[in-house]
Amino acid sequence: MELSIKHFSELSRDELYEIYRLRVAVFVVEQQCVYQDIDEADRSAYHIFLKDEEGIQAYLRLLPAGTTFDAVSLGRVIAVKRHCGLGTRIVEEGIKAAGQIFGAKEIKIEAQVYAKELYEKLGFVQTSEEFMEDGIPHVAMVWRS
């Protein structure tokens, strides 16, 4: 599995298309959540993905501080094949890239409640009560080095 870490400006058209197709398939269609997935934050993001001969298998976007939160953040986390370690691996790569690219000592996320345990295993701590975001239960979480 090949790891890619690319700023929006470095993505090829085919990579961008595959990322958007995957995100819409999961967040809009599968989760039946009508919202604007493609947003201005994509332009400032680093897009991190694991790809094999079948295409992108895991993805997340890494956002600089001040984009959605006052701290660096991760979002749009997807693992195509579930329960085989890809979600954990892509988040680990996101944490590592946050430190290398932005010198991040803190990362904030809004996690879907069903995935909270995955983030806790990687050192994230819940910092809010459960809340609804686009009709899906979430919690705020933070990771600190």
Image (spheres, rainbow, N blue to C red):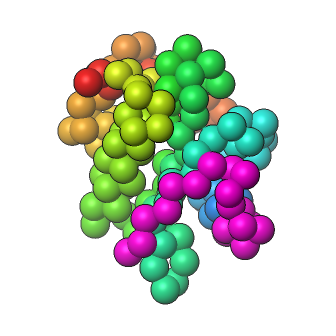
Query: Residue 70, position in %: x, y?
Result: 55, 14
The residue lying at 48 percent from left, 72 percent from top is 51
Which residue lies at the image location 50% right of the left edge and 19% below the top edge? 71
At a point 32% along the width and 47% down the height, the residue shown is: 92
Is 98 inside the magenta-drawn segment?
A: no
The residue furthest bottom is 53
Q: Nearer the viewer, residue 111 or 64?
A: 64
Quadrant occupied by the N terminus = bottom left
The region drawn magenta spans: 1-18
Residue 6 lies, in percent from the top left, at 58, 54
Judged left or right of residue 59, residue 1 is left
Q: What residue sits 74% from the left and 42% below the top?
A: 43
Q: Return the x and y of residue 4 as percentages of the image width and height.
A: 49, 62
Residue 52 vertical position relative to residue 64 in the rendered view, above or below? below
Task: Please say whether residue 67 is visible from this viewpoint.
Answer: yes
Place of residue 79 in the rendered image (x, y in percent of width and height, measured from the top left): 44, 60
Residue closer to the observer: 114 or 81: 81
Given residues 116 and 17, the one toward you in this image is 17
